Amino acid sequence: MRGALGLSLLLRAAMALRPPQTIALDALLSTCADACARGCARIVAARADGAQGDATLKIADDPKSALTKADLAAQSAVVGSLSRCWPGLRVVGEEDETAPDDDVQAGEPLDRSLKCGLGTAPLDDVCVFVDPLDGTREFVEGRLDNVQCLVGVSVNGVPVAGAIGLPFPAEGPPVVRWATSEEAGVVGGPELGVPTRPADAPIKVVVGDGDNAAQGAAVAALMAAGAVEVAIRGAAGNKLLAVANGDADVAVLHAKTCAWDTCAPSPAVVRAGGRVTDYFGAPLSSYAGNNRGNDRGVIASSARGAAAHARACAALRSDAAALALLEKRGVRGPSHAADVARDLSGALLDLAAVRAVVGERVESFHAPEAEAFRGTLSTGCRLRLEGVGGAPSSVFLKRVLMKELPAAVKKAAAQPQKLARDVRSFGVEASFLDSAAARAFVDATGVLLPTTLSSTLEASAEPLESGSLLWLRDFSPDDGFAQRDLLAGDDLDRVLASLARFHAHFWGRPAPDVWDSGGHWQPNFQNAAQFETGVADAWPRLVENFGGAWDFLGVEGLETLGARVQAAAAEAGRRAHPFADGGGGPHAWRTTIHGDLKAANVLASPSAVAFVDFQYVGDGLAATDLAHFLTASVAGDELLSADGELRDGALVDSYYASLVDGLVEAGGGGGGAP
């Protein structure tokens, strides 16, 4: 008995240590296309046998739920052959519960010859979605040009490739198209071009004939956003293929479609320069785990329809009929930034997720559209909570998923080193705001930081796959907090005092797990060319852009100033950031600096100051942090008097007095102040 138990444990250990199995995605797509061709053959044969006349309804009185022998035969052919070809692969078919697994060709090899540069993926991350007969209602009614057989490949829940079978093309035998986000072709034929509608053609929307309120709201929003023509078209995949083909600019699907309807045609839309989202603008990238449904509707657009698509989604985030789709998730409010209020898998936040962070007493929540932001390298929203009991009435959600941010995708190709820096910066921010050091600072000084209620980091060797999700203490307008374009008056005085207290608290004892040398603007985070020729090259353009302002300032040697700044830049950078590259620097002056303190990263109320955005917090000189703040955040009349006299000295003196007081409070006695 002991021997058997020992052998079992050894086998389990060996399995655990076995490298994860990978799958060649080119070969997988090739077999999907071949299986799709078999599905098309079964559909054609079933129609010849009169299958269109034997339909049953899976949902009573709903012709869209029709099921025929053709569905079952195609499912058996596609799913059966793929399951035998790829043991261990997850294959999910629409008719899994009813279709037999006895297709006569299931054991025959599938073609693996297609090459399209997809690479490999861990087998556990891959799922194939099959709609054996998309458009069963149309099949029964004889509208055969709408019918398709769909086989889509997803990796980590994201559609990456698809085979689209056309059993009844306009002419000739069945055709199978394949597509990735980069390439497309016809099985046995040439690669396809990227068609588009004529530039002067009106924006055309294709939609089903249902009377669903949310779908109607989506079409109305598109019309208000500039669409002109609306055409009724059957079958989900057929609508998306119309966009990919250039037959339409936008397609709208109701909220009852599933992954097997959209996974296969979505890459074809992306390849044609378009995108596929839910009604609220979030990408359809959440087919992970057991999630299968598109219960927030679907909008797909080509490049021509992109502007109307974006404007329609923005409108739907404040549309009652569309927002009704979210009520089962606990969302209640006049608007909801559903494209932002998501977890890192892409799934929409629901009441259970909110309760897990802030407590069970929350009854509902929403993210007001006016209080959300969509930045180049991060997104965020305020979650307003109802029925919270003693919990906060709002929290702030900061979400970063690099592969969803166009600026990050561009950086991956053009400036990969900067993208790697950005990825690390969000990890530094999460570490600092989650630290005992940050909480101790707030407790000791009363200066506020957005400390974390919960944080999730997803690090990856591939920077675009990295992300972070931070649930943060909120500084709401309801409590008097506001951002200013530029700071002046009492707000400026209190921010200077708060910055001094921040530096004093960490003086000689910098916060752990931050950048060795803080500061977004430090030389190590810039391109070398900026310190060699960048300033001098840009100077003539800057002189021209600022025009008469130079005369007011009375700058001497204006034409050569750019070259002189360029000559001093490298040395100035080293002196301002002495701890970079492991430099010892003046340790007696070492503290923690914010690293990117500008007006946008300050929230002030009549009684408190809060600093936010800590991606570049780290060791540094207080003077460097202060200088950046003064030049980037202060109203002009606070820096320059009406007669042209600089007033920066008075601001520095005010900061310095608060720094000395802060050092005394922190136990430094004030004698360590520079």
Image: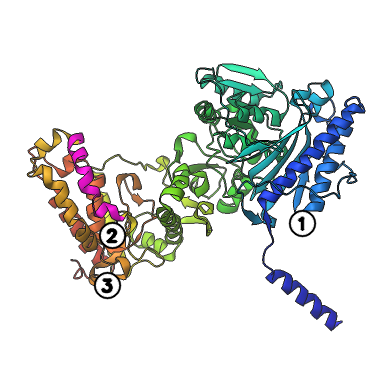
Element at label 3: loop
**Quadrant hosting residue 622:** bottom left
Image quadrant holding the C terminus, namely: bottom left
Camera sees residue 414? yes
**Mark 1 = which residue?**
88
Q: Position of residue 531 (x, y in %)?
A: 25, 54
Q: Nearer the viewer, residue 478 or 94?
A: 94
**Quadrant hosting residue 263:** top right
Q: CA distance from mark 1 to mark 3?
A: 55 Å
The magenta segment = 528-545
Q: Nearer the viewer, residue 128 or 105?
A: 105
- Left or right? Give the position of 156 relative to 431: right
Up-down relation of residue 179 to residue 1 (above or below): above
For mark 3, does the 10 Å Cα neighbourhood hold few (<14), some (14 to 19), or many (20 or more) residues? few
**Quadrant hosting residue 234:** top right
- Left or right? Give the position of 210 relative to 425: right
Amino acid type, mark 2:
Arg
Q: Position of residue 145 (x, y in %)?
A: 75, 24
**Magenta portion: prevailing SS class:** helix
Mark number displayed over residue 584? 3
Element at label 2: helix
Q: Earlier in the sequence, mark 2 or mark 3?
A: 2
- Left or right? Give the position of 414 relative to 471: left
Magenta residue check for 253? no
Q: Earlier in the sequence, mark 2 or mark 1?
A: 1
Q: Position of residue 673 (x, y in %)?
A: 19, 66
**Mark 2 = which residue?**
501
Image quadrant holding the N terminus, namely: bottom right
Q: Position of residue 489 (x, y in %)?
A: 21, 43
Up-down relation of residue 339 to residue 652 (above or below): above
Q: Nearer the viewer, mark 2 or mark 3?
A: 3
